[in-house]
Image (spheres, grey):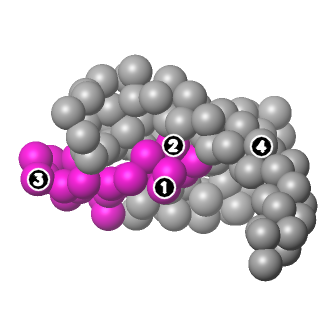
């Protein structure tokens, strides 16, 4: 076992301890824009650590990802609760991307039409 494995595990345990009050607080509202990426990063770290043979780090990161998934499911703003919030977040990101692409492609046309109206 590498000593780094224990250091990363300790960091994960602290993260879990610091996230626990948010999971327990029924009035907490954590935006999906913060919690979904944090959940995803925790899961990616868990997989990465596992492939490096750092089992304790992998378990710790999996625990962090689980805490973030609980926050995603039950502490996001709005009336929705449950794992479906991940899908809601992804759909929202896709819609924002589409609006950005459409908005970017029509900006020169809008600028040209506003100058011709002067």
Q: Is residue 39 magenta?
A: no
N-term mark: 4 or 2: 2
- Name the residue that disc number 2 marks: 36
How far is disc 1 from disc 4 in space, using C-alphas? Answer: 25 Å
Q: Residue furthest bottom?
A: 118
Comparing marks 3 and 4, which lies closer to the viewer?
A: 4
- Sequence-earlier tag: 3 or 4: 3
Q: What distance separates the C-alpha of mark 4 from that of mark 2? A: 25 Å
Work out how far the residue at label 2 is from the one at label 1, CA to CA, in angstroms: 6 Å
Looking at the rendering, the stretch of residues picked out in magenta corresponds to 16-38
Q: Which mark is residue 27?
A: 3
Say whether residue 46 is visible. Answer: no
Q: Residues within 10 Å of mark 1 (few under 14, many from 20)?
A: few
Determine whether label 2 and label 1 are within 8 Å by CB. Answer: yes
Looking at this view, is 117 or 7 the one in front?
Answer: 117
Q: Position of residue 45 (x, y in %)?
A: 68, 45
Percent x, y of residue 15: 42, 60
Which image quarter holds the C terminus?
A: bottom right
Residue denoted by label 4: 102
Chain-order first, disc 3 or disc 2: 3
Q: CA distance from mark 3 to mark 4?
A: 37 Å
Q: Which residue is mark 1?
A: 34
Q: Quadrant of residue 96?
A: top right
Question: Mark 2: few, some, or many residues within 10 Å (few <14, many ≥20)?
Answer: many
Q: Residue at x 84, y 74 (%)?
A: 115
Mark 3 in CB contact with mark 4 (< 8 angstroms): no
């Amino acid at each position: 076992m590498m000593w780094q494995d224990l250091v990363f595990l300790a960091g994960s345990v602290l993260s879990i301890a610091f996230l626990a009050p948010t999971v327990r607080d029924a009035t907490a509202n954590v935006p999906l824009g913060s919690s979904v990426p944090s959940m995803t990063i925790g899961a990616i770290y868990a997989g990465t650590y596992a492939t490096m043979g750092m089992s304790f780090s992998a378990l710790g990161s999996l625990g962090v990802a689980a805490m973030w998934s609980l926050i995603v499911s039950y502490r996001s703003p709005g009336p929705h609760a449950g794992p479906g919030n991940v899908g809601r977040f992804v759909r929202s990101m896709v819609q924002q991307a589409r609006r950005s692409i459409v908005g970017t492609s029509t900006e020169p046309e809008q600028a040209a039409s506003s100058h011709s109206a002067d």
